[in-house]
Amino acid sequence: MAAIMWLGLSTLCAAVLSLAGVYLYLNPQIPSAESYRHVQLETPLRIYTADAQLIAEFGERRLIPLSLDQVPELFKRALLDTEDKRFYQHNGIDFISLSNDTFGLLKSVLFEGSLGPGASTITMQLARNVSFTLERKFLRKFKEMLLALKIEQELTKDEILELYINVVPFGKRAYGLQAASLTYYGKSIEELDLAQLAMLAGIPQAPSAGNPINGPERALRRRNAVLSRMLDQGSITVRQYQATIELPITARIHARELDVPAPFPAEWVRSQLLGRFPDLYSGGYEVVTTLRGNLQATARRALRKGLMNYDRRHGYRGPEARLGELSVEQYLQRLGNTAVYADLIPGVITAVSETEAQVLLADGQNIVMDLASVAWARSYLGVDERGPVPKSVSDVVQPGNLIRMQLMPSITTPEGQLVTQWRLAQLPEIQGALVSLNPLTGAVLALEGGFDFGMNQYNHALQAARQPGSGFKPFVYSAALHHGITPASIFMDAPLVWDDPLLESQYRPENDNNRFNGPTRLREAFYKSINLISMRVLLKVGAGNVMDYVSRFGFDTATFPRNTQLAIGGGTMAITPIDMAAVYSVFANGGWQVQPHILDKVLNLNGETLFQARYPQICDPCNVEEPSQDPLEEPKNLEDLLADNNDIDTEDTRDPEKDEDTPPIIPAVRVIDENNAYIMHTMLRDVVLKGTGRRARSLKRQDLAGKTGTTNDAADTWFNGYNPDVVTTVWVGFPNHQPLGSSHYGSNTPLPIWIDYMAVALAGRAERFPDQPDGVVAMKIDPVSGKLASPRQDNAIFEYFLNEHLPKSDIAHLPPDETTGEEIRPEDIF
């Protein structure tokens, strides 16, 4: 008997010593339980508009934290009944479950060299998910147990359960309950029913293989097992169980719902932050941009509408693919692998007649496409040529064609029935960009860089440097005003000829309409966009003087031509849409250079501001000790300014005696005087009132100004326009620089897009007009000669002049004779 007692005591001592040895060996290898009170949840980068609308999310893990009181009671019961029914009774290790699973554990250890998942409490699973790998090793199980004991001493049961619910993986990149709910059901957790909650409660056992997408049969069995456990524990009634057990799986993958999808500006923001934060995609950072949600959504709609309108006007290029005769299953498989772009849905023609075609969509839906749906689809023959109007549906499509369909607004029949309309569509080859700025701050209000980011990630708004065409003329004319030319100056609109020994023939530039107007006032030549007069202005001022002057706007003139192409925005000139919007802001704000920017501030997971981006502001006078730059000094070009935008200033330079929430002002630089800016504004306003931009009068506002731009071969079309509150540039062209067609100009291709956008951007804004500066004088002139009008002249008009360049006092006489039409060489002009 004594021997047995000594043997038992020895065994107990050995066990205690063994456990102590295991503790001493493992304890240094596990993290402190205190760290679980401050677990950093791996949360993706989220980017918002200035009005708090989500535009993008970047990161492998999709996690949306919940507090325990936000978790439905049914889910808590489902989880505890299935995973750890004695959770609130044990101290981290459920010794009852552990003893029940001893045989299975020993079998796993002795014969498989690993440890199965049995006997793991929620606290142990928490330890595994936060601190250890998911590999099932015997030693790791002991670490889990030891850490679970320590966690239970540090955290309350509710804190442990809340943390577990927020970090456990549910598959498909979803971590935590709320993310799983949105991923599989597209709804917040409080909107789910019992079947859906039970399905989610069963996933953590096998998040990859056992989720309802990867393993639907396994997931269904697991869900039903969860329901059985809930019934056994009295968490649900027999009636609830019977009503739920037969329900089918309703889960499918739901992408995170964005308030305003904006991949082009979001990628710009991401690229600015990349490399500055090692945990950019998991640190839970929130970025606030300068974008306005409704304007960004409007920009996207307006640009897509304009590009599709152009595309339809030029005819149908045929199906995306000819699949031939296949089974319905094969068609559906092909459709499932074909992406949806810009809401243009892929479909396959399964049957066709003269009057209609049957179209199979990816969701298995069959729709009918009638002759009216394909009426626009004349065959594309060339940029200026189309085939005949289709007389039957079979003239356009054939069975096996992979096509695109566009859902149109529903119509109501005379009987009151709502009818869904579909139209044949195609993915445009044309591209475009829209950039909208606040001219007083340079803040980007909206930016769209192409037809669809999924099709082409190239951001034309930031990267597509193209010829500006006539959109560059305002800067040449501003230089002319600076050098003494007035809006009343007369220039000859007549042929120009250059003899160049390097050319086989003489160079004879032309106007767009191949007409000549004879003597023309500068203002009239500007709003009519007469090319030959722009060239004469350049020759009068001098290309060198113009180059020196326009550089103050921020242009990088290194590649600008030093010939007459400079006058019409041609040759080697290349400017991006965002640069054009920035330089037009100078006219809109009265002569100041602003820096286009999209980044406002970055917050951490706790909502604390990590830094607030700072940019030049218009302030006259500025409450700073020293100006940032001499107003007469040549400012940085836009390329340098945009590079500076990547250098976020995190140093706190605020004055402690002032409001700590107000960062110091960086004053903007005045690049042209307010008098020049005012006269140019009146000339740009005339472009809208009676010139090439008069289509914009449809907005019924008097405070709009802007300039069309079309290159010689119509490869680039622009409209750059503004009012004092919003500057917007729209560009439309082909990526390969091919012409848009002989009938396309800045006035009819990008301008309608600009109008659609500005109708929303200016809605509710009162008209604003700049005050006439003291240095500008309005005087009556003769509209033909440009000279001061006689006191009794009936047809006199008002014109603006710089105070230092007033017209001579001679009074206008009879109008000059009409031009003879003879060719005038450069040395004879002006």
Image (cartoon, grey):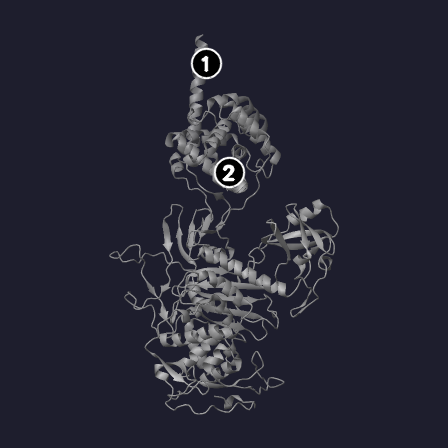
- Residue at the top extreme, as displayed: 1
Q: Residues within 10 Å of mark 1 (few under 14, many from 20)?
A: few
Instruction: For residue 450, say whether it is visible.
Output: no
Q: State the residue in front, 347 or 164.
A: 347
Question: Disc count in the image?
Answer: 2
Q: How far is disc 2 from disc 1 in space, using C-alphas? A: 47 Å
Residue that mark 2 sits on: 169
Residue 152 placement (x, y as % from top left) = 40, 30
Q: State the residue in front, 558 or 593.
A: 593
Q: Residues within 10 Å of mark 2 (few under 14, many from 20)?
A: many
Q: Please determine whether, in this image, residue 699 is positioned above or below residue 533.
A: above
- The kind of residue on which mark 2 rests is Pro
Q: Residue at x 50, y 60 (%)?
A: 299
Instruction: For residue 407, say whether it is visible.
Output: yes
Residue 416 placement (x, y as % from top left) = 59, 49
Q: Please determine whether, in this image, residue 785 is positioned above or below residue 156.
A: below
The mark nearer the N terminus, 2 or 1, is 1
